[in-house]
Amino acid sequence: MDSISWRLRAMRQLAVATLLTALSGAWLGHACAATLDGQQFDDTAVLSDRTLRLNGLGLRGVAWVKAFVAGLYLPAPTRDSVQVLTMPGPKRLRLKIMLDAPSHELTKSLTSRIARNETEAAQAQMEDRLTRLAAHLDSMGDLRVGDTIDIDFVPERGTVLRLNERFVGTPVVGDDLYRSVLKIFVGDKPVDKRLKEGLLGGGV
């Protein structure tokens, strides 16, 4: 083979290799997990036979103390908090713990924030169910850095808790209860405005 033919062949091979690398990189970029503050989240999650999309990520922290990174999974992406709260179908709120703490601290925060976001009448209607959900959270015991908590909504079952992929307690019925939990994160009175903004990213 003469030098010109060899160079042409080499250039073609280089062009093909470059194209394959670019396509591979694009595919990997789509498939790899989203990351915030070192915490990785899959782009999708399967719940109740539905594929949910990661809508956004947000960090909950005060000053230099970082409590957790949250990821919100929805059937369809949105930047509208009202749509998040009213959207039908399964949903997942995933918390990746970044601070050693007893789970009852999370329970206290959840119940106090629900009281801040809901009317007395709504709280009274959910009282027994909220007590059950709080007991499930308390039963998790001491949370450690690296733990993962899933707060799922499963139609026909209600709010389902998992700690490190293991179910905690039993489902607590009512989409109103799950909506109250979501309000803590993306409602009109969120626990952290930056956290809310991150979760309403509309797809990451």
Image (tube, grey):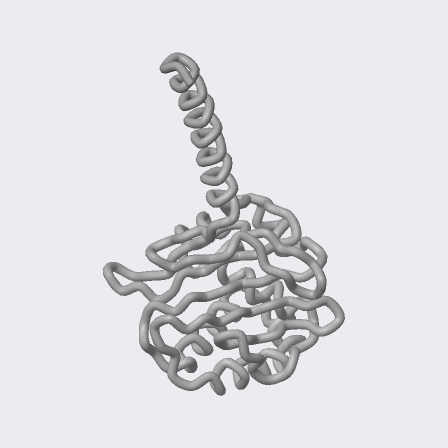
* Along the line of sight, the residue nearer the viewer: 23 or 40: 23
- Can you give x and y, in whole percent of width and height, for residue 78 in the image? 59, 45
Q: Residue furthest front?
A: 1
* Along the line of sight, the residue nearer the viewer: 45 or 102: 45
- Can you give x and y, in whole percent of width and height, for residue 144 in the image? 36, 77
Residue at 38% over, 59% down = 39
In the image, residue 181 sits, relative to residue 30, either above or below, namely below
Query: Horizontally, is 202 left or right of 174 in the view?
Result: left
- Can you give x and y, in whole percent of width and height, for residue 26 in the image? 49, 38
Q: Residue furthest right?
A: 156
Q: Residue furthest top?
A: 4
- Can you give x and y, in whole percent of width and height, for residue 143 in the image? 39, 79
Query: Horizontally, is 38 left or right of 30 in the view?
Result: left
Residue at 48% over, 28% down = 16
Residue at 36% over, 15% down = 3
Q: How many marks?
A: 0
Residue at 46% over, 33% down = 22
* Along the line of sight, the residue nearer the viewer: 23 or 2: 2
Quadrant containing the N terminus is: top left
